Image (cartoon, rainbow, N blue to C red):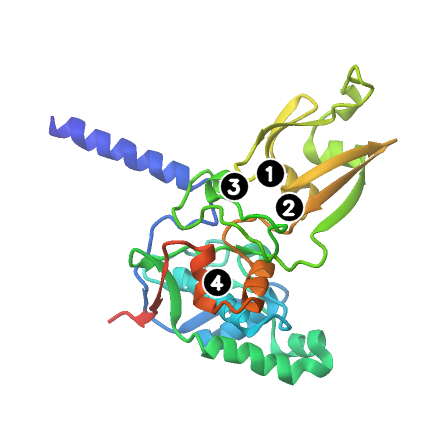
Amino acid sequence: MKKRLRRLILGLTLIVLALFTLIPQIPLFNLDPKISSHQVRLYHHETGEIETLPMEEYLIGVVAAEMPAAFHVEALKAQAVAARTYIAQRIATGGIENQSIPNADVSDDHRQGQAWISKEEMKERWGIHYLHYYLKTKWAVSATKNKVLTYKGQLANAVYHASCGGEATENSGEVWQVTLPYLTSVPCPYCADPKPIRKVTYPLQKVSQRLQVDLTAVPVSTNGKTELIKVKEKTTTGRPKTLQVASKEMQATNIRSLLALRSTNFTYNIEGKNITFTTKGYGHGVGMCQYGAKGLAEHKKSYNQILTHYYPGTELKDLKIKK
């Protein structure tokens, strides 16, 4: 009986581990909001060098890279907390290791987590506004010093994206197949993205190569329209989720990645040998919408109210050094 119980527990554990390997942006375990050091080992992907920075100094570079400094300061504060929570997960005991860069906690490449820029890059980006924007960004980080987002006493996975498109954020389960209670869809009425709609045109041949499908074999329907891509399933927010691409079934998240689309909220139109994708919003759509945070801040919402809106059920706590 005991052997069967042990086997059952082991089997369930392996299943859970297997599921979580499918979700690289969601931590395997919830973590206590305590860290062993306030130092961050930052890998510079262009030079290959690793630099050690105080956490608060590192966060200034992240906020400067991830959110326009012209945004309302309350939105910048919300961004600072989300970014601090992110890096805390990586330097916490038992946190998320950077397996591709063993001696670093995080990279400055946004494709490997969250972006970071130096003061020199800030000067180049902001020009004559450098001093004002630097002090504003530094204040947003300092005003939220040590604050992290938690859920039931554990570090939350405070993911964020640029723009939801102006309606609602997405459920985490629709993107990463595991639903976290604080990463559910919420209304985003004040998304301030000035250009949520974008278009990109590709030759059909290039789409065929990237998606590894034979588009030349796609039949013409009775109404004369080529059924190149057909939405088979939508998310609860109305975004495409599963699509039929020629003879191949694909997830919208994979199509977005392979075609470098701004979001999974897309439609398409074929003209001759080209296909034009029209996207709405920018990013995976889960968690805090940065342009939505800007809109909420402009409607007199504080940074903690912004965080509560996008991460329902979470709380702010102080990040402490583990003794």
Seen in the image, is 236 located left or right of residue 144? right
Q: Residue 239 carries which label?
A: 1
Q: Name the residue under label 3.
A: 175
Tell me residue 184's x, y (percent): 45, 46
- Label 2 element class: loop
Seen in the image, is 130 located left or right of residue 300? right
Is mark 1 in CB contact (under 8 Å) with mark 2?
A: yes
The amino acid on which the numbered mark 1 sits, given as a three-letter code, is Arg
Distance CA(mark 1)–CA(mark 4): 24 Å
Tell me residue 178's x, y (percent): 42, 40
Is mark 4 in CB contact (under 8 Å) with mark 3?
A: no
The amino acid on which the numbered mark 2 sits, given as a three-letter code, is Ser
Distance CA(mark 3)–CA(mark 1): 11 Å
The amino acid on which the numbered mark 4 sits, given as a three-letter code, is Ile
Residue 313 visible to the viewer:
yes
Q: Which mark is residue 269?
A: none
Residue 81, quarter of the rendered image: bottom left
- Nearer the observer: mark 1 or 4; the answer is 4
